[in-house]
Image (cartoon, rainbow, N blue to C red):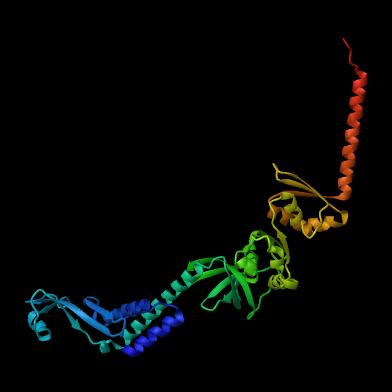
Amino acid sequence: MTKELCYVIEQISREKGISKEILIEALESALVSAIRKKYGDKRNINLSIDRQKCNIDVFESKTIVADVADPYEEISIVDACKLFPDSKEGETVDIPLDLHDLGRIAAQTAKQVIFQRVREAERDVIYNDFKDRIGQVVSGVIMRREKGVYYLNLGKTEALLPFKEALPNENLKRGDTVKAIIVDVKVSQKGPAIMLSRTVPDFVAGLFRLEVPEINEGLVLIKDIVREPGERTKIAVYAKDSTVDPVGSCVGMKGTRVQIIVRELKGERIDIIPWTDDPRILVARALSPASIDKIGINEEGKTAMVVVNDQQLSLAIGKKGQNVRLAMKLTGWDIDIISDTEYSKIRMEETDKALADSIKKDRQKNDNPSVDG
């Protein structure tokens, strides 16, 4: 039993990623349960497994007495001397038991306990592995969909991608390979529940870390990222080294890097913006792809007035205000956009008002001339 047992323990340890010590402890517990089921719980039975050779020793501990009152706990000095000639009254002896007498029911009990402990240990390994990977992007294969949830095969285990965390109008099918970010790992009765998302902004940031070595190595930093899933993402990047082009690094040669990400996001538009501490420049860049003519800011109120060409107005605002809404989230500034025509009209009204005020002051001055002493 020793060589076969060692081989089985090593094989399970490799396949399940469970330490040999945990498996041996599970086997010890299982065998003790099986033995006690056969011989009764009242008996003081112990078991040990050699960690190197996998030899199993089973013994029953009893105290040596002159007259036996409790046969489960005691052994007479006469019987003890038959087994151990040097036995003395008051000592405790370990009497070997034969494992071959376990029987079918006891063996089945041992098997069930081992499987249960292995499952528990496997769950612990999976939980400890994935709880430290929250925030990482993983790739999985769609196995099935049930009750508003996609189940993805991640290799060692399954993960859950709720429909609401998939991209809008995304219809994933069995066998599809998709990427998602781990947002949480919960403990449940069925084992660790690994929760995924494809809609959070960090998912796009994770895709850039996978595809852009400069970001993964820390040469280019993601300063901020905002997103409306399935529609548009704006990401502000900054290079520590002035010789590194942060936008060019993200785009890649002929757009290869960003195109891979866009395909994963099912065509979602991505605006990559170079970060700057100058709020005027940052606001102007955040409104990309629109071109800005003029911009004025109020630093105390963190508000900005942006003037664009009439033809650029709808582009700057975006569909249902999406572009300006994302720009405000990215910069943290309240942005008001007007066209050149509207701006000219406002300036003309201001000029007319200033002229009217000036005329009014002159009239008041003429109607009330000063009198010299």
Q: Is residue 144 visible?
A: no
Nearest the viewer among 3 and 95 is: 3
Q: Residue furthest top?
A: 373
On screen, residue 295 versus residue 332, left or right, reads right
Give coordinates of residue 88: x percent, y percent. Answer: 8, 77
Residue drawn at the location 12% of the way across and 85% of the way down:
83
Dividing the picture into quarters, in which one does residue 318 lie? bottom right
Give coordinates of residue 321: x percent, y percent. Answer: 77, 56
Q: Is residue 129 visible?
A: yes
Q: Residue furthest front?
A: 243
Nearest the viewer among 2 and 368 is: 368
Residue drawn at the location 70% of the way across and 73% of the way down:
260
Give coordinates of residue 17: x percent, y percent. Answer: 45, 78
Dividing the picture into quarters, in which one does residue 98 lie? bottom left
Q: How many numbered marks, from 0 up?
A: 0
Quadrant (top left/top right/bottom left/bottom right) for the C terminus = top right
On screen, residue 75 versus residue 9, left or right, reads left
On screen, residue 301 versus residue 73, left or right, reads right
Give coordinates of residue 137: x percent, y percent. Answer: 59, 70
Quadrant (top left/top right/bottom left/bottom right) for the N terminus = bottom left
Residue drawn at the location 29% of the way across and 79% of the way down:
32
Nearest the viewer among 14 and 97 is: 14
